[in-house]
Amino acid sequence: MPPKATDDQSTLLADMRARVESAAAEIDRLTSELAAREEWVDELESIMDMVLGMVDTPVVVVGDDRRIRALSRGASAHLTSDGVVGKPLSSVVPEEAFAALEARLAMAARGSDEGDVGAVGPGSMPLDVQALPGGGAVVVFGAG
């Protein structure tokens, strides 16, 4: 016959069960919150794709790895390469334009807007670069 649990052991076991149940409830809450956030992100991505598809201004969204994540209809018309999403920005922008653009991307990443690059990019249009909170940037050709 197994030995009887003492009151201390019973209290400890009850406390452990309560902690496990609390942790399970917190995991359920976090899982629900994550699912809601994923739905929100999907909706925002759909909206962004729709808006970029209607914009004639050349806009390119690049990741912190300088690869193209998205582009507007206007940018598609100016970039000569097909299927540019996922490609490095340097492979679709002229070399001299990319050098100036890279400097502006670095400034945007640091939160600085000094040192206007001037005319670079598709059609040598003025350029605006805005850093994204998670890294990367939105590059707008023809702004200004």
Image (tube, rainbow, N blue to C red):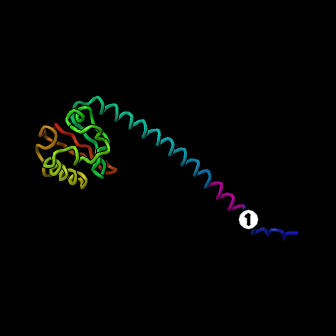
Magenta stretch, main secondary structure, is: helix
Position of 1 with respect to 102 (left or right) is: right
Residue 45 image point, x, y percent: 38, 38
| Residue marked by disc 1 | 11
Question: Disc count in the image?
Answer: 1
Q: Residue furthest top?
A: 54
Give amino acid for label 1. Thr
Is 142 magenta? The answer is: no
Q: Nearer the viewer, residue 85 or 140?
A: 85
Residue 101 image point, x, y percent: 18, 49
Is 18 magenta? The answer is: yes
Residue 142 image point, x, y percent: 16, 36
Q: Nearer the viewer, residue 133 or 61?
A: 61
Q: Which residues are magenta?
A: 14-22
**Vertical arrangement, residue 130 with respect to residue 43, above or below:** below
Could you tell me which quadrant the N terminus lies in? bottom right
